[in-house]
Structure formats: structure tokens, C-alpha cells
Image (spheres, rainbow, N blue to C red):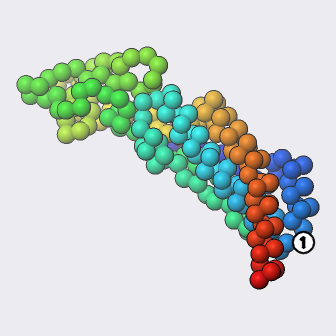
Amino acid sequence: MSKPFEVIISDGQSTLQLNRVAQALRGIPKGYEKAVSRAMNRAATAGRAAAVATIRNEYTLKASTIRRHFTIERASVGSLEALVIGKGTMLPLVQYKTRPKTDTTGNARKPVRVQVKRKGGAKRLGSSFVFKGKILQRLGTKSLPVKEAYGPAIPLIASNDEISRNVRNVMQETFAERIDHEAGYAINEFIKKKRG
């Protein structure tokens, strides 16, 4: 299993804006915590979407495959910190763009071609064949032993500087946009409860 990819957003960021929000919500019990945690959760969701989109632009993986490897640890009133975590092991090469998709054993022998990154074309994978939906590679010149072929893991892909920087920027921008809206929502919620 590769090292997990993590991006954290906490209430220590954009302090001037947070001070203004704290000042506006000072009379509302847990108002500041609610507004900040909601904004952080929105930022984390946007960060995961940005990670999926950025990886999808560079690699030939399906969005659902990428999204499945990302989890969000949500912020709460008691814990003002949201995380986007990418976990997982190396992905089978069949999850990337491959040709042919059908079995290449017996009389249907064809060379297996794989394209991991969008830039560049499909490369021929030597001593390999497709069998029951898996790409297998021979380890020697004989028929056996064989092993399944794998490509890079999602945390390894996501730890690329460009991808992690993009995710971090999207999370910070979303948090900055959402915090004022969430503060207004907390104020309106408090007023509705007061009226009764």
C-alpha cells in the first residue's frame, strides 16, 4: 500500500476573514464553529472533486475509479479540521486504457497495448496477454509463472506537485467563498429560533 495523500484545511487559514466572522457570530452559541465546519466540509468536497478532475486530465482512469480512492474526514463543531485523503494500492493495468479488452489466449492472440497517461500513445506491453479480464505478464520465456500487471496508485499520482497544489488552492478558494455565506446562514438560523 502506498503512502496516503492528505490535504488539510483548518481554521488557522485566512485569519483576517475568520476574525471578521468570529466577531459577527460572537453572540450566537456555537455559531462560529458551525459556520467554519460547514465551510470546511464544502471545501473538502470541492477539493476531492478537483483531485478527481485533475488526475482525470492527466491519466486514462475513470472518474469513479479515482473517486473511490478518496475519502473525506469531515469537520465538526468539536473538531475544526477537514481532510481529503487518498488511499490505495497499485491499480491493475486493466483499469487504464488498454487494447484489446477481450481475452488474447488461444487462437485470438494479439499484442496488448496500454496507455496510462493521456499524453503519448498506447505502448505495447511485452510478454503479456489478457485472460478473464486481467492483464497478465509472463515472468520468463515459459508459459508459467505469470503475474498481473499494475500501474501507479492513486496516492502516488495525487502526490504530484501540480495536482496537490491545485487541490489545496481549490480548497482554500472554496473555504474563502463559503465562510461568509455560512456565517449569514448561522445568523438567519439563530434569528428564526429566537422568533420561535
The residue singled out by tag 1 in the image is 27
Farthest bottom residue in view = 196
Q: Is residue 64 left or right of residue 9?
A: left
Q: In the rendered view of the protein, which quadrant contains the C terminus?
A: bottom right
Residue 130 image point, x, y percent: 22, 31
Q: Give the residue at x 90% y 72%.
A: 27
Which residue is painted at 90% across and 49% down in the image? Answer: 16
Residue that appears at 70% across and 38% down = 169
Camera sees residue 65: yes
The kind of residue tagged 1 is Gly
169 relative to 58 in the view: left or right: right
In terms of depth relative to the viewer, which is nearer, 71 or 180?
180
**Residue at point 42% right, 35% down?**
61
Residue 51 in the image: state x and y as whole percent: 57, 39
Q: Is residue 56 left or right of residue 143?
A: right
In the picture, residue 187 is in which quadrant?
bottom right
- In the image, residue 11 above or below residue 152: below
Q: Nearer the viewer, residue 105 or 100?
A: 100
Q: List the single residue furthest toward the left.
A: 107
Q: Return the x and y of residue 57 as percentages of the image width and height.
A: 51, 29
Q: Is residue 6 visible?
A: no
Res 163 → quadrant:
top right
Q: Position of residue 191 (x, y in %)?
A: 81, 73
Instruction: Specify few, some or many for label 1: CA neighbours under 10 Å numbering under 14, 14-19, or 20 or more.
Output: few
Q: Nearer the viewer, residue 91 or 119?
A: 119
